[in-house]
Amino acid sequence: MNTLAIEDVYPLAPTQQGILFHALDDNGAGVYFVQASIALHGQLHLPAFRQAWQTMIRRHPALRTSFHWEDLDQPLQVVHREVDLPLDVFDWSHIPEHQQPEHISVFLEEDRRRGLDLGSAPLFRVTLLDLGADRYQLIWSLHHIILDGWSISLLLQELFAVYEGFLAGAPPTLPPAPPYNRYISWLQRQDMQAAERFWRSLLAGITAPTALMIEQPDCAAADKPVIVERRRLCDPALADALQSFARQERVTLSTLLHAAWALVLRAYSGEHDVIFGSVSSGRPDTLPEAERIAGLLLTTLPVRITYNAQMPLREWLAEIQQQLVEHRQFDYTPLVQIQGWSDIPRGQPLFESILVFENYPLDDFLRGKTGSLRSTDVQFLTPTNYPLTVQVMFTPGLTLSVSYDAARFSAATAERVLDHLLSALAAIIADPEARVGDLEILPEHERKRVLIDFNAMPPLPPLDRPISSYLAEHVRTRPDAIAVRCGERSLTYAGLSARTNQVARWLVAHDLPPGAPVGVFAERDIEMLIVLLACLQTGYAYVPLDPVYPDARLQQILADSRCAVIATTSDLEQRIAALVDGLETRPIFWVWDTPTPAIDAQPSSPIDRIVPAE
């Protein structure tokens, strides 16, 4: 590297270090590759546009920065004196207007796959698509390690202000830009001992991340990028109502959003104490001109919110707001250190979802006021390494988006997340006198689906005898009728009874103690019902072990239940085997999708065994 071409060298901010780690371990997922996509309308003067971008590069060191880590004790960022402007212009005016959105979508995907080389500056590129009839699509692709959302907004506003100046023949009159290394120096002066005391106190007693419990992989997305986004533009009336409620109750919009997401997480996890990540702008009041620094200042920090059904809503919101205020005092803390101060075992994430409130200085730009050009459909696409990211922007209406890992969630699940978040927001502002337990997150169409008019239903017959006797009765009267179906597989009543009897006899043959726990670690399948019926016959306890649970929770269940037998499938066998390694007694395994001669050899007649009443 030519040292004469280097302007500055300094260490990475903690958030940059985390992004560098995940970027190097990306496996092609495109995490932290940001795309700002903006539709422009009007006559665009390309030479002035090019000059404006070159001015931005000269003004802001972040646009001239590369990152280096090989053979170094710690990674460093290098600011170059000069870099070339990576600007491509394509003429798409020949493409019919109704086909252009699809072509833009394909281009964005191809652009994301190209990625960026962290070791080469600049870590951004600009593409201008000429769509004809004075319409353009501006695509600014960059790596999140150099700029956060606040900075992107700041630079876009500066860019078009400079562009208008060049159009008018007047030189830009912007004040000097504060350099990013000012923030790095500020970080190095902060009190880490005070931060440690705060975070240890906040996270005390948390031993596992809040389980999302809504995993449902999208098999159709197997050939698409792992990170997928669903976006929704909401009714402007809701945005107005939220802002009015916030003013009336003297709370921030951020407080309302954090409360709403806590309600959703509580409903998903069933836990009264939830923890999730919250993205802060990281621009402290004690750092001069922090709001004008272009770089990566944002931080992702844990928020812990306790659900107390009896607490008045106003008190709950005030409690959440106070925690967010305290966060700002210590938002310089590296997340990796916070994790080390928590009780969550290393190797486990601190949280699996993050909330991003995009409160950026973009009002005029979002309203289309860019001088001679008009902007519409401003979108920021920022995949992260978290399984679920919820983003909220007031534009000036309300836009919600969910970025999710398609290997864990389906598009339908993401849409329901948006539904539930909207319902939670509406419930919070509906009645400030309510208690927390009165807040309902189910939208109306879901409530109608799950609520049953019991008066309109015929009464269910009483279970005055064991379930096994009902099954035996069906075996006698309709043995060839389908009893259970799962996907392409099905069993008749005779087949279900026979297999249940074989499994029950196999369990008894192991001479297990009365009430011995039998764990089932598998996705939904016919064998789950067979194990349940076999437990009812033998008096053993059925213990469901959901594969979507985090390992820490599964280990706790296994330690508490002390399962004598675990039924599973071959794709999950290795995982559950690792989880039981530390137990005093290793359970007996039944892998039901592999050959099972010991079970197949058992008689299929009912077992003669007296068990407690069902």
Image (cartoon, grey):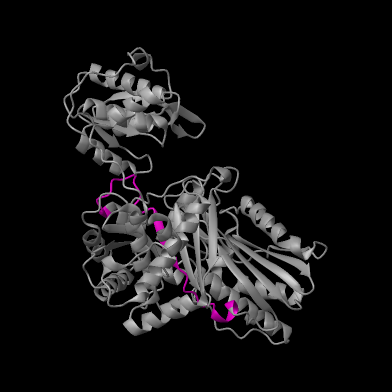
Say if the magenta span includes residue 365. yes
Q: Position of residue 379 (x, y in %)?
A: 58, 67
Q: Position of residue 189 (x, y in %)?
A: 33, 68
Q: Relative to residue 366, is residue 66 depicted above or below?
A: above
Q: Which residues are magenta?
A: 341-366
How many numbered circles does the render carry? 0
Residue 124 percent location from the top left of the image: 61, 61
- Say if the magenta span includes residue 609: no
Q: Quadrant of the C terminus?
A: top left
Residue found at the far right of this picture: 94
| Left or right, 64 with reference to 280 | right
| Left or right of residue 559: residue 87 | right
Q: Is residue 582 something that shows in the picture?
A: no
Q: Is residue 258 visible?
A: yes
Which quadrant holds the N terminus? bottom right
Report the residue at 38% width, 43% height from top. Answer: 548
Residue 586, compared with residue 62, is above or below; it is above
The answer to which quarter of the image holds residue 498 is: top left
37, 313: nearer the viewer: 313
Snapshot quadrant of residue 378: bottom right
At x 23% / y 25%, what residue is drawn?
538
